Amino acid sequence: MIKYYEGDGRLSLVTEHNGVLYLTGRTSEGKDIKEQTQGVLNIIDETLAKYNSDKEHILRVQIFLKDVLRDFDNMNEVWEAWIVKGKEPARATVQADMALEDRLVEMVVTAVMRE
């Protein structure tokens, strides 16, 4: 059975099937890529905790950057300080246009619930 959480008529913030959590893409305000990346990671932490998971249970992350060449290293600096060493999830990072002009990064997370 699929469970849908925090739906708004367009999308659900989280869906769950057999203990696997699928988070919708998240962005954050901020003056630069480091601030926005930290904001997104904070949102991910809060969302995972709300649904009985955490960053040690992330399976995969898709990262969309507005400008990969400019922002990849600075985004990774924040990412590497946040992620648990030895429990790094599979990850893809690509360049993409953003729905909101001021957004520099969006992340989509797939995680499992804690047992």
Image: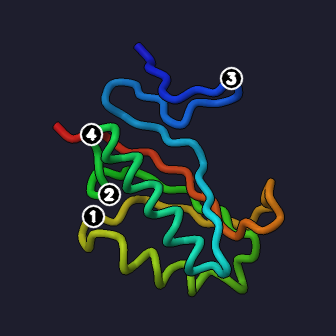
**Could you tell me which residue is drawn at 55 percent across and 71 percent down?**
37
| Disc 1: which residue | 87
Q: Which mark is residue 55?
A: 2
Where is the N terminus found, in terms of image quarters?
top left
Find numbered disc 4 in the image and state the secondary structure of the residue it sits on.
Answer: loop
Find numbered disc 1 in the image and state the secondary structure of the residue it sits on.
Answer: loop
Indicate which disc, 4 or 1, sits on the residue closer to the N terminus: 4
| Disc 3: which residue | 9
Q: In the image, is 3 to the left or to the right of 8?
A: left
20 over 40 or under it: above or below: above
Q: Position of residue 40 (x, y in %)?
A: 53, 62
- Residue 67 position by quadrant: bottom right
Q: Residues within 10 Å of mark 1 (few under 14, many from 20)?
A: few
Q: Residues within 10 Å of mark 3 (few under 14, many from 20)?
A: few
Amino acid under label 1? Lys
**Could you tell me which residue is drawn at 45 percent across and 18 percent down?**
2
Q: Single out the mark in the foreground, 4 or 1.
A: 4
